[in-house]
Image (cartoon, grey):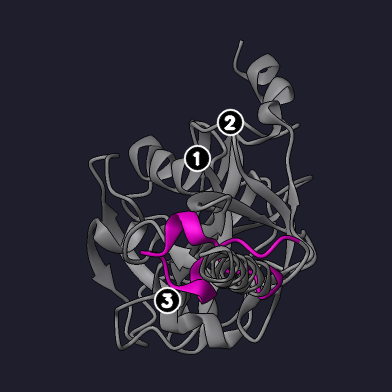
């Protein structure tokens, strides 16, 4: 009877050690046994690569898994153009190239200063809760906008990316409503003043993508406004290039003084 009891005890010990060894091996390989429903490659990998995704189709907020959930991401501010491989994040088949713009997020958790490498995110750090208001918004090249010639990114000549690369917008129909669309897209507040011919900013070069605008002010980008495309007809010259000063610029206080 004692021999039989010893055999049972030894068998139970071997079974317990086997289960414990399997659990240790699983943890060493990075498997989270408490969240087996999540694919391993999509879980947060602290100090390693993060697989990016978007909150919605372009434009959308750049996201990555962190502690088992998707959180917004900010890119290191070296370039506004992420790697071309990230164009696959946009479902639009015509989106061959994407750009990064500033966006906002109402969250206390985000990853900051990420670097994009073919096309994963590396070297991300968890930002302090009060530093998660500015995040990266990914837009298809056909939706991208930038302001050129001002003291910062929130003031200057309006440039859109389209056929032929970066180009300008004619001042026909260019008003505060249209300016608000641009300022909102760049997370630069609202339009303080819009300019065209005889404005404060130098004329551009290259294509003039839009010759006439009619915006309501609620569009997500100028292409969504009722527009007349130039298509090489040269209705406008670059002396009529549209420009805007947004409330988020350092030039804003100077412009307010000018208007008072």
Task: From this view, report whether residue 63 is shown above or below residue 256.
Answer: below
Q: Is residue 115 left or right of residue 61?
A: right
Label 3 secondary element: helix
Q: Which residue is mark 2?
A: 108
Q: Position of residue 135 (x, y in %)?
A: 59, 47
Q: CA distance from mark 2 to mark 3?
A: 24 Å
Label 2 secondary element: loop
Q: Position of residue 65 (x, y in %)?
A: 53, 58
Q: CA distance from mark 1 to mark 3?
A: 34 Å
Label 2 environment density (alpha carbons within 10 Å; few <14, some 14–19, many ≥20): some
Q: Is residue 148 left or right of residue 99?
A: right
Answer with mark 2 or mark 3, whichever residue precedes in sequence.
Answer: 3
Is residue 160 among the parts visible in the rendering?
A: no
Q: Which residue is mark 1?
A: 194
The prevailing secondary structure element of the residues shown in magenta is loop
Q: Is residue 176 left or right of residue 128?
A: left
Residue drawn at x 71%, y 71% as measured from the top left: 28
Are the two marked residues, 1 and 3, in contact with CB atoms closer than 8 angstroms?
no
Q: Which residue is mark 3?
A: 89
Instruction: Give the number of the mark in front: 2 or 1.
Output: 2
Q: Position of residue 42 (x, y in %)?
A: 50, 69
Q: Which one is nearer the viewer's eye here, 222 or 80?
A: 80
Q: CA distance from mark 2 to mark 1?
A: 35 Å
Going by the picture, which residue comes out furthest to the front? Answer: 1
Q: Which residues are magenta?
A: 27-46
């Amino acid at each position: 009877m004692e021999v039989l009891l010893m055999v049972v005890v030894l068998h139970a010990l071997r079974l317990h050690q086997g289960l414990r060894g399997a659990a240790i091996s699983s943890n060493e390989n990075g498997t989270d046994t408490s969240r087996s429903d999540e694919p391993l490659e999509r879980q947060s990998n602290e100090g390693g690569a993060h697989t990016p995704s978007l909150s919605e189709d372009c434009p959308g907020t750049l996201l990555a898994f962190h502690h088992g959930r998707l959180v917004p991401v900010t890119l290191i501010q070296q370039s506004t153009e992420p790697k071309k491989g990230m164009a696959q994040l946009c479902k639009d088949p015509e989106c061959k190239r994407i750009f990064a713009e500033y966006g906002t997020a109402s969250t206390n958790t985000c990853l900051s200063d990420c670097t994009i490498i073919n096309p994963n995110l590396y070297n991300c750090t968890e930002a302090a809760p009060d530093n998660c208001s500015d995040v990266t918004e990914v837009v298809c090249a056909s939706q991208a906008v930038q302001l050129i010639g001002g003291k910062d990114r929130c003031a200057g000549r309006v440039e859109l990316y389209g056929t032929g690369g970066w180009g300008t917008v004619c001042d026909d129909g260019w008003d505060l409503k249209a300016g608000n669309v641009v300022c909102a897209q760049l997370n630069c507040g609202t339009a303080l003043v819009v300019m065209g011919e005889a404005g404060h900013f130098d004329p551009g070069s290259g294509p003039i993508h839009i010759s006439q605008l009619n915006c309501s002010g609620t569009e997500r980008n100028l292409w969504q406004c009722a527009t007349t495309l130039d298509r090489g007809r040269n209705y406008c010259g670059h002396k009529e290039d549209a420009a805007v000063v947004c409330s988020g610029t350092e030039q804003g206080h100077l412009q307010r003084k000018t208007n008072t």
